[in-house]
């Protein structure tokens, strides 16, 4: 019996001692290579490594890694490092970097399952749209329940269950949902905010809806018009939240994700575009941009 207990203890100890952290190369600037299984190759974002691998960081280079889909840290000092020595950096801390974003990036860069990369962003975001209410011929995606808008082109869209050609779009002040601030008839299932933005005032909230022409739709969605100053403060905060190094593409992608989560959809679109442009070789950035455009009816 003692031999069995001892054997079980040794097995458990061996398992725990042998458990390794996994590392994802997130962002790289300058010259850096990876030595894994005695083979040295250039460090490339998106690659997953175990603690047995080594990281060579050249002079002036910077490498940011994600450990166990939960912690992000940066190596700036030149040298050769065995990744197992960074186990302390794998501990989850109260970092201001969005934990949801870190899990999302890990999932997207390491998953090879079904679905297009970047298409399940909402599963990692805090915001969830409300269930549509009422029965009518128009359906507005819950993703548009609340939109924070600063400037630029971005469409408000809907679906129609009727074979209609014309739709009445109306927008109201949140303080007077009976009298339209702006009303028009469109022949498409969307309208660009930029076409009526001059009728709106920064700092105010509005309610909008669309209906088949001649019908009514009591379901109202929220459009908050945000001043450039307020948005600038938010953007500065989001940029400064991450103390780890990010190249331009990685920072743009993170900002896009966080802005989308905060309902700044036009601004998120701009940063998803920046990320895909800054690193056109990263399939995640390009696929996410395409998914975003599809989700919000952007052509």
Image (spheres, helix red, strand yellow):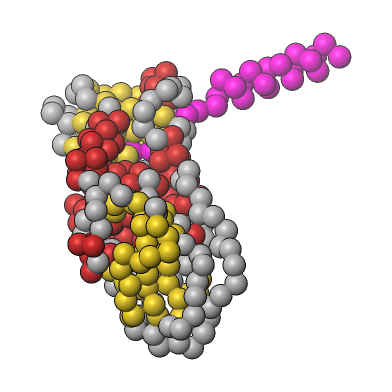
Q: Residue at x 37, y 69 (%)?
A: 170
Quarter containing the C terminus: bottom left
Quadrant in the picture for residue 258: top left
Residue 240's image quarter?
A: top left
Pick whichever, 74 or 150, lies toward us.
150
Q: Position of residue 78 (x, y in %)?
A: 19, 23
Residue 65 is situated, as x and y percent measured from the top left of the image, at 34, 33
Magenta stretch holds residue 62 = no
Q: Residue at x 55, y 24 (%)?
A: 18
Task: Determine which quarter of the picture holds residue 199.
Answer: bottom left
Q: Is 55 in front, or is 162?
A: 162
Examine the residues drawn in magenta and state their main secondary structure: helix
Q: How many marks?
A: 0
Q: Residue at x 38, y 45 (%)?
A: 262
Residue found at the very far right of the displayed protein: 1
Question: Where residue 248 appears, x then y in whole percent?
Answer: 20, 44
The answer to whether one can see residue 37 in this image is no
Q: Where are the magenta residues, as a range? A: 1-25
Nearer to me, 220 or 50? 220
Towards the viewer: 25 or 91: 91
Q: Please give left or right for residue 155 compared with residue 249 in the image.
A: right
Q: Quadrant of the N terminus?
A: top right
Residue 4 falls inside the magenta stretch: yes
> Residue 253, image x and y in percent?
29, 47
- The residue depicted at 39 percent of the width and 77 percent of the height is 168
**Residue 268, placed above or below residue 102:** below
Residue 13 in the image: above or below residue 239: above
Image position of 99 with respect to 15: above or below: below
């Amino acid at each position: 019996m003692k031999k069995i207990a001892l054997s079980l203890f040794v097995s458990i100890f061996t398992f725990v001692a042998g458990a390794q952290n996994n590392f994802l190369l997130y962002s790289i600037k300058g010259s850096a290579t990876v030595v894994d299984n005695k083979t040295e190759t250039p460090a490339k974002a998106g690659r997953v490594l175990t603690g047995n691998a080594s990281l060579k960081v050249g002079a002036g280079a910077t490498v940011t890694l994600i450990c166990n889909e939960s912690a992000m840290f940066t190596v700036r000092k030149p040298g050769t490092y065995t990744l197992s020595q960074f186990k302390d950096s794998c501990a989850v801390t109260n970092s201001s970097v969005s934990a949801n974003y870190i899990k999302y990036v890990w999932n997207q860069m390491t998953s090879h399952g079904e679905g297009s990369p970047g298409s399940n962003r909402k599963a990692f975001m805090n915001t969830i749209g409300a269930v549509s209410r009422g029965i009518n011929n128009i359906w507005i995606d819950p993703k548009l329940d609340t939109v924070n808008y600063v400037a630029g082109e971005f469409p408000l869209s809907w679906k129609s269950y009727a074979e209609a050609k014309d739709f009445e779009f109306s927008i109201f002040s949140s303080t007077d949902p009976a009298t339209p601030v702006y009303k028009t008839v469109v022949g498409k299932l969307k309208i660009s905010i930029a076409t009526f933005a001059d009728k709106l005032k920064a700092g105010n909230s509005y309610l909008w809806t669309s209906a088949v022409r001649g019908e009514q739709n009591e379901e109202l969605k929220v459009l908050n018009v945000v001043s450039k100053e307020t948005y600038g403060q938010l953007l500065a905060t989001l940029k400064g939240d991450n103390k780890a190094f990010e190249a331009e593409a990685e920072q743009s992608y993170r900002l896009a994700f966080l802005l989308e989560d905060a309902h700044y959809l036009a601004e998120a679109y701009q940063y998803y575009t920046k990320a895909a442009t800054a690193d056109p070789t990263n399939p995640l950035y390009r696929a996410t941009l395409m998914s975003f455009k599809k989700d919000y009816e952007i052509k």
